[in-house]
Structure formats: structure tokens, C-alpha cells
Image (cartoon, rainbow, N blue to C red):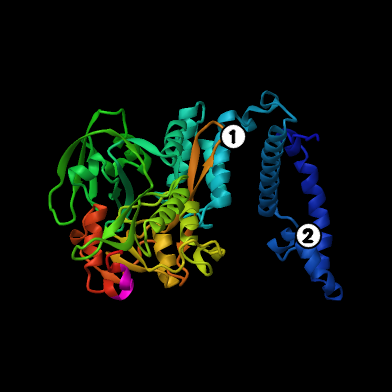
Amino acid sequence: MSHVVAHPTACLSKQQSLLKVTAGRRARTCTALRDPVRSRERTSIARRNPICLMSAEDRVDGAQQRTLQERVQQLCRTAAIFSTAAAVATGSVLPSMLPPSYAITEENLIYLEAWRAVDKAYVDKTFNGQSWFRVKEKTLKTVSMDDRDETYDAIRAMLASLNDPFTRFLEPSKYASLVGGTAGSVTGVGVEVGFEDNGKGKTQMVVVAPAAGGPAEMAGILPGDRLVAIDGVQTDTMGLYDAATALQGPENSKVVVTTRHAADKQPKDYPMVRQSIDIVPVSTTMCPAPGGGGTSKVGMIKLSTYNSNSAGAMRRAIRELREQGAEAFVLDIRNNGGGLFPAGVEISKMFYDKGTIVFIADNDGIRDVYEADNSAIAKKEPLLLVVNRGTASASEVMAGALSDNRRATIVGEKTFGKGLIQTIIPLSDGSAVVVTVARYQTPNGVDINKIGISPDWVVDPATLPGDKEGLCDSVLSLKQAPKLFGDTLKPAV
């Protein structure tokens, strides 16, 4: 396939003849437009000749001629840009053959990849009330992209114009780190961070959840703590991945994390030593019977994250607990800040056969729905779901699904309220853009974002121990427990 590149000089050289022809033709055409005898032709003529609508006169005066000339110039420039882009994209012409003003460089193409990713996928089609096309055009015309750093800066500036802290750019190293983090291990302090509204129209960085057994949890950092600084650098100037990069580092290296508890007026420094944290998605135990006297028939499952191993580990956990005599389950998703959305959907399917799991919505309404598919492996056993403020994202999807379908009773405190869906779109140079593509809605149509999931049994999180055995004792001793669990609370014979 060949492409002809429209050179702007050649195009503009024909303007005078075009204007002369247009002036005479317009007089005849516009007269026809107003001829009552030819009224049926009006609509088609007007569509073909919008310049007829510029004036009631049948001549092109000086002002109109200048207007028309400007339009022709703009069309010529547009033709040159789009023909050039098409030729470069298909390899029909080398960038070195193009006029300097319209050459598309390798750096421009990286920028355009990122622009197209947002253009196609972003949840808000008003793009924060701006013309997304004009953002691209202005950047290409006015912003220097002579090297990769400048290109990355241009992409960051473009994404920042959306005023969405979750839509962000990842350099190749950060993208590789993120992929590794969802695969099973990370070296750092073991804390997930996010943004929440500070009540004054701005966002602030907070702790979503500390990893079980990690340095942050051992130091006393709690879900919902305001993350003030990392090694003395204020987080107000950081994005999420800047913070994640600062928190991670070589094993046994030191870092000082400054946070403020919700009840405290002053922040506090927490010196920590980074550790390699193996992300074990699922762990289990059989709960002791309340009051002692042996083991109950209630199996405890701790689900820490949703990664590529979570669904398989959950299936094994259910099977192994049944083999130990479990006839009911407590599922602990406290401080589980989410992870891979598909894993959350797969685990939800394990507990009921029919019904909606989650709706996916954007500004135009619901665009997709995930349903249970008759693949449940634990659809009858009594189920208690334990949540807290560190329960977020994919965990909230599962909590909403189990609650709205009356499959589980939820105990604890209201969840975090992170109901936005991001997708990661890799770029050709190894970098990536993370784009907010939709919002979660529960089966009952509740928008999770900034609202969260409310528990059926509200329990002070301070009364629910972190260890599995202690949690078993606490939740099975609640006054509502006998009604839910029945005879499964009795010691197994």
C-alpha cells in the first residue's frame, strides 16, 4: 500500500484558484439554497456547502474570503499531518524524507501510544472536561521530546491533566517491579498505599493495608494511617508508584516511614529494615470450639491478596479443611487491599452457583457484568466474612457479591471504598500506563468507590486479633454466632 504525503506548500499554492472558483460557485449554490422552488434540495446543498450559512449575501466579501482562506490553510495542515502519520505508521516513507515541521519521531510515537491508550480506555470520556485531541495536538506542537526523559515528562503531564491519581505512568523499571509484585514476592516494608479525600477537596496518601508479618505491621502501622513522609521526603509531592519505589529497596536496608494515626495530632517516625516479603495468599486453621473442649467444625481461611496463585490456593484450602471436618468457614480478608481482579472473581464463584458477582460501569452506565457460572465448590456451608478498613478493591468486590447474594454474613468495620478499576497497558519501550477504565458496582447496584461495604455485624476492629486462632475465638464468641453457625460450633467428635 502506498501513501501520498501532502506537502503544505503544494497544497497552499492552490488556494487562490480555489478561492476564485468557490466565490463564483458559491453565488450560484447559495442562490439555489434560498430558491423556494428548489426547497427539496436545501438540506443536501447546505450539508455540502456549509459556507452558504456564513452570510445572507451572494458574494464573498473580504472578511469571508479571509475566513475561507484560513479554513483552507487549516485543512492543508491537517492533511499534511494525517498523511504523514499514516505514511510513517505503515512504513511507506522514512521520517528523514519528511518536512522537518511534520516529521514524527520515535519519541513522538511513544507519546502517541500512551495518548491512544487513554483515548480508547479511559472511564471519563470528557477527559476531565477537556478536548483530548487538543491535548495531543498542543503537546506535539509545543513540547520538546528530544530524548526519552522528555517524552516521559510529556506523558506524565498529559496524564496529570486528568486529575486522576490512579491513572499514571510507569517507567520500565517500575512496570517490571509491579509485575513482580503480583507474582508472589517483594522486598520492602510490606505496606500498600492509596489515596483518599482529606475532606478539603484534595487527596492524601494513606495506608490501605500492611502485609501480615511485614515490617510495617510489626512496627504498629495501621490501615487508614496518613502516610506523611518516607525518609523525610513529604508524600504530598509523590505519586503512588513514587511512594512504592521509596518504600521498596535492597533487603536489610533501612528506611524511616512517617505516619499519623487517625486519633493522633502529630505524626510519628517508624524506623524499619526492609525485608523480602513472600506473599502467601492463603493460610488456614481449624477453629477451637468456643469455651474449649476440642476443635469445632469451623475452618478459618486467611486470604491476604489476589495474585496469580490465589484461586488455586483457595481451592486447596477448602478441600483440606473439609478433610479435617470443616462444615462452616470464616474467611478473613482484613488488610487485603486487592490485587488481580480476575482472581477476585474466580474466588467469588467458589461460594455460589448463580447470580451476579459485579457490574462494571463507566460514565455511560453499566457496560459489563460478571456472573457466577455453576462452578461453586462451597455453596452450602455457613460463611462469615471478616473485613476492616484495609479491605479494598477486589476484596470489596467479593464482599459486595457475597453480601448482596445473601451468601455470607459480614463482620467488622466499613471497608476502604476503592471501587475504581485500572488496567495496565504496556508501551513498546517497556514502560506502561495504568488507566482507570471503569468503576465497580455491587450486584445491588451500589457504587463501591469512596463508600465501601458496610458489615452486617459492626465490631470494633481492636477486639478482633490478627492471628487466626485469636480471631476464631473472638468471632465464634459473638452473640450472633450461634444463629449463623449452629451445631458447627460444637466440638467435633
> Is the residue marked by circle 1 packed among few (<14), some (14-19), or many (20+) residues within 10 Å?
some
Give whichever of 481, 158 is nearer the camera: 481
**165 w.r.t. 153: above or below:** below
- Kind of residue at badge 1: Leu
Residue hosting label 1:
109
- Residue 404: x, y in percent? 43, 71
Q: Secondary structure at mark 2?
A: helix
Q: Position of residue 445 (x, y in %)?
A: 46, 71
Above or below 474: residue 86: above
Q: Is residue 71 above or below residue 146?
A: below
In the image, taking residue 110 as reference, residue 212 lies left or right, namely: left
Q: Residue drawn at (47%, 37%), measured in percent from left and top?
A: 154
Q: Nearer the viewer, residue 206 or 345?
A: 345
Q: Secondary structure at mark 1?
A: helix
Image quarter in which the N terminus is found: top right
Of badges 1 and 2, nearer the viewer stands 1
Sequence-wise first label, 1 or 2: 2
322 left or right of 141 in image = left
- The image quadrant where one finds the C terminus is bottom left
Question: In this rendering, would 275 be left or right of 18?
Answer: left
Nearest to the observer: residue 226 or residue 155 = 226
Residue occupied by mark 2: 48
Q: Which residues are magenta?
A: 483-488
Disc 2 residue type (three-letter)? Arg
**Residue 215 figure quarter:** top left
Residue 127 forms part of the magenta stretch: no
Q: Position of residue 271 (x, y in %)?
A: 17, 36
Q: How many marks?
A: 2
